[in-house]
Structure formats: structure tokens, C-alpha cells
Amino acid sequence: MDDEKLPSESRGKPIRCRAAVSRKPGEPLVIEEIMVAPPMPHEVRIRIICTSLCHSDLSFWKMKDFPAIFPRILGHEAIGVVESVGEDVNEVTEGDTVIPTFMSECGECADCKSTRSNLCAKFPRPSNFMPRYGTSRFTDLSGEVLYHFLSVSSFTEYTVVDIAHITKIDPAIPPSRACLLSCGVSTGVGAAWRTAKVEKGSTVAIFGLGSIGLAVAEGARLCGAARIIGVDVNRDKFEIGKKFGLTDFVDPANCENNSVSEVIKEMTGGGADYCFECVGLTSLVQEAYACCQKGWGKTIVLGVDNPGSQVTVPSLDIICGKTLTGSLFGGLKPKSDIAVLINRYKDKELQLDEFVTHEIRFEEINKAFDLLIEGNCLRCVIYMTNE
């Protein structure tokens, strides 16, 4: 549905539009017409311009057990235009260009007011419903409720998002690039910039060179790291990674009788200053921690393993000053830090174009899942219209 088809009196009324609905785990999304209710107080209804596919979408699409829930509308990396706002929304108005994020920022709680955290105590975790009301804004044409995803749900022409998950941005940036800052690139770049605070001239090791790992490399490059070592089982990732600052590559299959941590400690003369785990395996967290420098080395975990997974590290390494920490959304506060990244892109410092390997129409959305499963893309941008 384009702007010409949208009557001006749509404000305050349900909108009928297309959405890609995930009805059963692992099965192709079904493009169907749905109803999107008007926003309640503190909510914003958005017309999605384009969206991109993140590995989290793939994981929840395949998931059969809780927290999986069906039918739902996936998607959480996007950019859109405000169609209408509910009461008590003052940050944005109709026609504003916005980025929805799974990360909330209410601006009122102790966490949001602190410079030490990017968490939000008021809305601590993304929801399958609207966070303030516990209800959905989506139904199919038979009246069945469709669940939200990570408080965004961008695989639809229109969505409703709480204002705590909305960031207004400069509309000058191309939408197909801006949408990447909704999750993946912000997470990786932020982990190097905000969480680790990578220092100029330092050595960085990155475990897993998917889009998140490569975004970490980009963040480390921007911070001035002298050496950025990538670890991956796919050697083709090294050539791709060079665009984002990779200087060295380690293939775990070619380490002979040595562990990856032993190889990296030998390469760096004792260990990397900063190590990042970007896959979501506790075994890799332990390996990354093992190869960071004693005394000051930091290991940052971005990958998410199965619930209940535990990490075991030597207590002596902890006593000797090695740090192990996690990073959610790269430690960024969406409403302020996304603007910084946009400005760095506009100033031709931050690379975004290089992350986009495929661009498709909304009708081809299942092709994006195939590409990600095959490992043939970093980010696939999905355009909601043919314009």
C-alpha cells in the first residue's frame, strides 16, 4: 500500500495492509492482508519503507519451543515514516522519519538516566505484545491475533511501536542504509566503541565474521585499532573482512595441534587487548577469554547461546585482571547514539554500503531467508514497495 492509497482520514482507524506472517516454525512466511489497529497512548504507527533480515529473525522463525510463539510478524531492523501517533507522544509527529529498535529507552528510569548502562528498567525486555498494555495491534482478516516480535515487527507495511523503541533520524540518509542501524551494525560497532572502548593502536580478535562480527571490525577500525584478527571457519570471510579493517585471519581448522587461543597468543605476543565472541557458543566465549591479554584484556560477548548455557573460566585469570562482559545493542543508547553513527556515515567515516549484499522486493522475502541460511549474504534489504 503506498501513500496514494492511504486516505487522510486513516488517523485513529485500523489500516488494512500486507504483512509476511510466520504461522509455523520453519515454514515460508505467508504474505497476507492484515489489520493494524491505531496507536494507543505512547505509541506510534509507522509505514515501513524498508527492512532487513537479521539472524535473530531466522533463529526465532525456526524455533519450536518457548519463547517461540505463532502466528507472529517477525522483523526488527527497519526504517519508516510516522503515519500517526497516540496521545502523550511528543518526540515525533506525522511524517517524521524514524528507526524502531528492540532496545528501549524510556528516558525516565535510573538506567536510562545513567551513563553506565544502556538498559531500560521500565521496559527491560522486548515483548510479544505492546509493552504498556500487553495486547497486540495486529489481527488477520479472520480476527485472529498476530503476535509482535522484539517490540518492532517490521515484516509488514504498517506496524505499531511504543515511543520508547522509536528514534527520530535525519531523513537525508538513504533508507536502505539507515535500517541497518536498527540492530546489527549498531550492535557490532557499538560493542567496540561503547562497550569495549577500543584504544588506538590496540589489538582486537573477533570470533565469528558474520555481519555482527564484521561490524565489530568496523567499529575497531574507527577506534584506531592497529591489528584486527578475524576467526572463522570460512576463509572467504577474510577477503570480505578486509573492507572493514581485518588485518589477520585464523581458520580453526588450520591450527594443527594448537588451539585458536594459543595461535592468537603467539601472534600477539601474549594475547589480544580486546576479544569479541559474535557466534553464541559458550565454547567460543571460553576460547576468546583464554586469548585475551592478562592484566587488562577484555572479552565482550555479543552472541546468544541457548538459555541455561554456562561459561567456565579459570579463577586465576579473573584475579589477574582479565574482564568478561556482555554487550546488548553494543552498549548504545538508541535515541542519542544512532544519530552519532548516522553523522559518521554522512561524513564518510562509517561504512554501511558494504554490508548490503542483496536487495529484494517484499514479495520475495522468503528468498532473504534462503540467502541467510546458505551463508551468502551479510544483510539483505527488503523494500516494501517497488518505488
Image: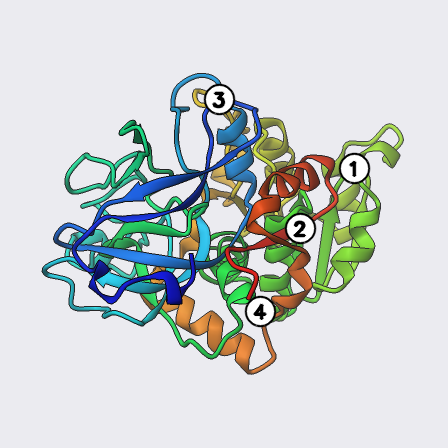
Asked if the residues shown at circle 2 and circle 4 are in contact, with their CB atoms under 8 angstroms apart, the answer is: no
The amino acid type of the residue labelled 2 equals Leu
Circle 1/circle 3 CB separation < 8 Å: no
Q: Secondary structure at mark 3?
A: loop
Task: Give the SS element for disc 4.
Answer: helix
Sequence order check, earlier mark of 3 and 4: 3
Is residue 286 visible to us here?
Answer: yes
Please name the residue shown 62% across and 69% down the image. 351
SS class, disc 1: loop
Q: Which residue is mark 4?
A: 223
Q: CA distance from mark 2 to mark 3?
A: 25 Å
Circle 1 is placed at which residue position? 233
Going by the numbered disc 1, the residue's amino acid type is: Val
Where is residue 349? Give x, y as percent: 60, 77
Alpha carbon separation for disc pair 1 and 4: 26 Å
Give the residue type at disc 3: Lys
Question: What whole-number distance in Å separates the C-alpha atoms at marks 1 and 2?
Answer: 16 Å
Tag 2 near tag 3, CB within 8 Å: no
Q: Earlier in the sequence, mark 1 or mark 2?
A: 1
The image quadrant where one finds the C terminus is bottom right
The label number, if any, that marks residue 24 in the structure image: 3
Nearer to us of marks 3 and 4 is: 3
Numbered badge on residue 378? 2
Tag 2's secondary structure? loop
